[in-house]
Image: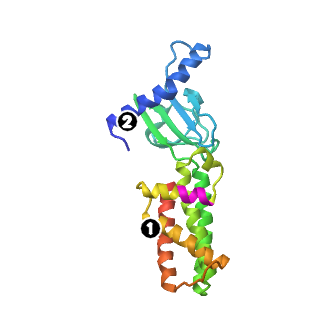
Amino acid sequence: MLDQQASTNFFNHVMELWINPEIEKRVKAGKLPENFVLTSAQVIMYSDGRSNVVRLNKEVKAFLVAVAKRALKVNEEFPLEDGIKEIKNIKLTERDDPNAGHVTFLRFNNEWHIVFDFRYNKKKAKDTTNAANEFLKSAKMNYEQDLWRSFVDNMYSATELLAVAQLLPHADKDYSKRQWHEGTQKRYTSFVDTGNFKIEYKTTLLELRRLRKSARYLSNKFTFTRDEAEKYLKILEDMLDYTDKRIN
């Protein structure tokens, strides 16, 4: 949530950066009249290198979470002020890329409603979190049977996938297209060291990576205890919950 001054500054910044240049370009090309009046605008943003898409007025596509003034019919078309009492939220529709970010402006009751979500790759992050949860469930089964090599291998996979899921909403173009072990470790370490996420998530990722080399590839003598397993399970449960809240 932004206060009034921050909202005004943000609105002006988006108008200056994306909306006004688009209006000017279209007016110059004869696609909009000189006296064009803006009533809604939307910028769709991608992290994979595609150019932003700017929508004006009727081009705007959005799913409104709102309080209705009256009973509305399915597929009924109406002016917003005629059917809507209050707008609670504005989201992208299912027709848009679920991994895109957006900022949407909508003028309603003589006020601008401003909603933005600059998290990229939300769908990909959710899928990655679900995959991490599967590996965590497998690790719990290994825990019940004292299968510590399999436990460490599954726990490392779960931890790395959760790290990826936390990184994806902030991802650069290269990482959005492809996630790899070294890239994840480097980015995640940097993110945690600059105050993002929890330090214990990073240390768990690094510790399990080291343990996995011994457990799976027999590179060194492998020793592991039930107390260690319980410690990592507690951290991973917290990491899963934290990640889920960050991307939903």
Q: Amino acid at mark 2?
A: Ser
Label 2 SS: helix
Picture coordinates of residue 170 (x, y %)?
A: 52, 49
Picture coordinates of residue 160 (x, y %)?
A: 57, 64
Picture coordinates of residue 72 (x, y %)?
A: 54, 41
Question: In this orientation, which residue lies closer to the viewer: 4 or 118?
Answer: 118
Q: Earlier in the sequence, mark 2 or mark 1?
A: 2
Which residue is located at x 49 percent, y 33 percent?
80
Q: Give the residues in magenta.
A: 181-186
* 137 vs 44: above or below: below
**Residue at the limit of the structure toward the front, as seen here:** 220
* 244 vs 224: above or below: above
Residue placed under numbered mark 2 in the picture: 7
Which residue is located at x 60 percent, y 66 percent?
132
Neighbourhood count class around disc 2 (C-alpha, 10 Å): few under 14, some 14–19, many 20 upward: some
Question: In this orientation, which residue lies closer to the viewer: 131 or 67?
Answer: 131
Q: Quadrant of the N terminus?
A: top left
Q: Which mark is residue 200?
A: 1
Neighbourhood count class around disc 1 (C-alpha, 10 Å): few under 14, some 14–19, many 20 upward: some
Would residue 119 be found to the left or right of residue 175 on screen?
left
